[in-house]
Amino acid sequence: MESILTTVLPVFGLIVLGFVFARLKLIDAATTRGLTQFVFMLAIPALLFRTVASMKPQEATPIGLWIAFFGGLAVTWILTTLISQKFDSLSASGGAAASMAAGFGNVALLGTPLALAHYGEAAAVPVGLILSIHAPLLWFAATLQREITRHSTTVSFKRLGRELFFSLAKNAIVIALAAAAIWRLTGLGLHPVADRMLSMLSDASIPTALFSLGLSLATYSLRGQWSGMTVLIAMKMVLMPILVFLSLYYVVSVPPFWAKVALLLAAMPTGANAFLFAHRNEESVAAVSASIALGTGLAAITVSLLLYLMDSNAM
């Protein structure tokens, strides 16, 4: 249990520190945006590039991992779509924003630092495999669901496909992973200078990601539809991890270490991209915002419990 506390407490301590700095207005909104862009555009991509470019050949393929993780996510997404119709705060556009909030976890800013802090750099491989298609796939699914609900006879799949392509082409994490995979094929390895630069950026990724998450949380509010927020938290932090667990251990064959990392990522609270989707479309904003704020706070408890169960081989 001590090792879990030494993992979880520093992680959430940095989040709280960022939250306090934002609340005291010691850091302004422009700085918050800049720091978040540094994390997503440079620090985490550098970490993933260095890991993939220098990793040894893997014995397992990502197919089983993707089936388990995104299969559990897909079932959660569908059930949330159905349940959301019973709540006014979640029913807009067929529950697209609600489904996004129930499926899109904070894998990058919270899941990645937690996985690396507890399991070490080896966790970057399964994390990278999930991150590589996480955001583009879910953005496409949510946009498609919203378009079908609002314009069932005029949906342009060509336009949606084009949006997905450009989303992938502009995603720094996807670019870094693809570039690393190509670089590995050359067999050249990493030059000491480049490796040192990537190492320095990688070292900065965890603390800056957590601090920027705390800064961002200060902008979310718990005010709104508490019933809708409760539904989203239950679907994202209870149902989805259970479904992913069942898939990992009873449906597909995945290396035990990968399974633990994937389950940890599945248990993450709702991520900021869900809020961006809701805010852009002005749908379910209050419930999604509240689920991010409260869910992240609850994660300090739920993550500790999950890590304890996995480390003690209770699951």
Image (tube, rainbow, N blue to C red):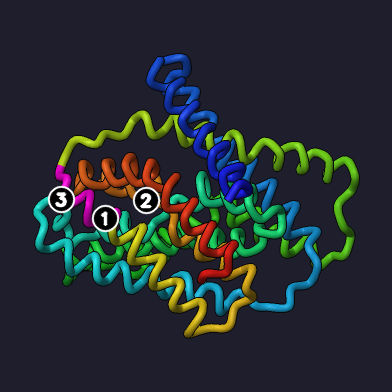
Residue matched to label 3: 227
Which stretch is magenta?
A: 225-233
Does residue 231 show up magenta in the picture? yes
Upstream in sequence: badge 2 or badge 3? 3
**Quick one: SS at disc 1?**
helix
Upstream in sequence: badge 3 or badge 1? 3
Residue 147 in view here: yes
Q: Are marks 2 and 1 in contact (CB under 8 Å)?
A: yes
Upstream in sequence: badge 2 or badge 1? 1
Dot 1 amino acid type: Leu
The residues bearing labels 2 and 1 have C-alpha atoms spaced at a distance of 8 Å
Residue 12: image location, x then y, percent: 50, 38
Q: Residue at x 43, y 58 (%)?
A: 267
Dot 3 amino acid type: Ser
Does residue 128 show up magenta in the picture? no
Q: Are marks 2 and 3 in contact (CB under 8 Å)?
A: no
Q: Residue at x 67, y 36 (%)?
A: 204
Residue matched to label 1: 232
Label 2, residues with CA under 10 Å away: few <14, some 14-19, many ≥20: many
Residue matched to label 2: 270
Asked if residue 46 lies left or right of residue 210, the reply is: right
Q: Is residue 195 above or below residue 248?
A: above
**Quick one: SS at disc 2?**
loop
